[in-house]
Amino acid sequence: MDKSKIIDLLNEDLEDEHGAIIQYLNHAYAMGEGEIACEIEAIARDEMRHLDWLAETIVELGGTPSLERGKMRMSGESTSTWMQNNVLLEEGAVKQYRKHIKIIDNPKIKRLLQRILSDEESHRSKFEHFVEKVQRERVKDRRGSRRDKVAQLLNWGIEHEYTVILQYLLHSYMSPNKEIKNQIEDQAINEMQHLGWLAEEMVGGGGKPKIEHTEVDQSPKTADMLRADIKIEKEVAAEYDRAAKEVEEADLKKLLLRLRDNEIYHVSVFSDLLKKEK
Ligand SMILES: [Fe+2]
Ligand SMILES: [Fe+2]
Ligand SMILES: [Fe+2]
């Protein structure tokens, strides 16, 4: 099988991992605190590792990791239906990985997919178990319909954080320099925390996180990537700063200032990398 065909198959898997991550994060945030939400978040983290392995393999083969998101199963009112949807999503993943393991002839990639497959089988049985457990423990959708300025601000933040997570992951995968790669990935992980903080704040305040993203910078050259990353960080730091001054509620103000300070730190990390790259 030629490389480009393998790249296509792995990108299909990667897109589905991306969809699974967002589906599970939506569920975990909606349920709020509690053991099951934590377990679902842990499964989402497994999927992030899968996405990471797949992306690295795609780059090794000379490809570019896809930014598309696979189909999600987000219908259903009750948390029990959500868990059924998650079982179906995992079943789909199990089927697809089995198929890809069969047709890909590269032993190292086969092994990797086998490794991922065993996780998906374990996820499927966990979600099967959760279908009944969320009913028994009366786990509810804790999201509300808040749509005021604060809710708009939080969703704006979520959209930004999701965008930069994708952007920094892509830049990290595509960068040939080890130090730059690691540093950008570190900041992506920090942005994942930001997404979580904002989503939790949103649900806690009676709103509904909307996990969608805007355009991702896809510059092919490392220096251009870093320039784009610095630009977006400066913009968002200014926006968090402005918003922090506007909001009344003390905890929210604190959160926004913390985010602002993290973003200012990212500007300095990326600026140092850019100096070295030039
Ligand atoms: Fe996965
Ligand atoms: Fe899974
Ligand atoms: Fe951030």
Image (tube, grey):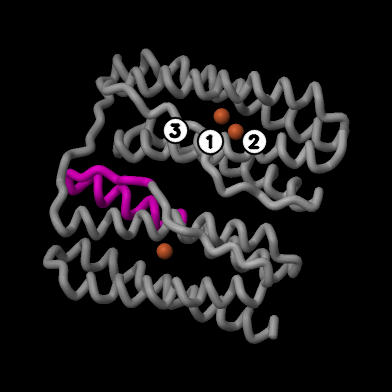
Which SS type dominates the magenta stretch?
helix
Q: Residue at coordinates 42% horizontally, 77% vertically from top-left?
A: 234
Q: Label for residue 12?
A: 2
| Residue situated in front as seen by the camera: 34 or 128 | 128
Q: Specify the quadrant of the image occupied by residue 138.
A: top left
Q: Are marks 3 and 1 in contact (CB under 8 Å)?
A: no
Q: Residue at coordinates 43% horizontally, 27% vertically from top-left?
A: 73
Q: Label for residue 40?
A: 3
Where residue 129 appears, x then y in whole percent? 45, 16
Decide whether residue 212 is among the magenta residues. Answer: no
Q: Residue at coordinates 62% horizontally, 47% vertically from top-left?
A: 66
Decide whether residue 194 is among the magenta residues. Answer: yes
**Type of residue at label 3?**
Ile
Q: Are marks 1 and 2 in contact (CB under 8 Å)?
A: yes
Evaluate whether residue 46 shows in this view.
no
Mark 1 within 8 Å of ligand 1, using the beta carbon = no
- Vertical position of residue 265 compared to residue 28: above or below: below
Evaluate whether residue 265 shows in this view.
yes
| Residue situated in front as seen by the camera: 70 or 241 | 70
Where residue 164 appears, x then y in whole percent? 48, 61
The secondary element bearing badge 1 is classed as: loop
- Vertical position of residue 39 compared to residue 182: above or below: above
**Displayed-image quarter of ligand 3:** bottom left
CA gap between label 3 and label 1 equals 19 Å
Question: What residue is disc 1 on?
Answer: 70
Q: Residue at coordinates 85% horizontally, 37% vertically from top-left?
A: 108
Q: Which residues are magenta?
A: 192-211
CA gap between label 2 and label 3 equals 23 Å
Q: Specify the quadrant of the image occupied by residue 167.
A: bottom right
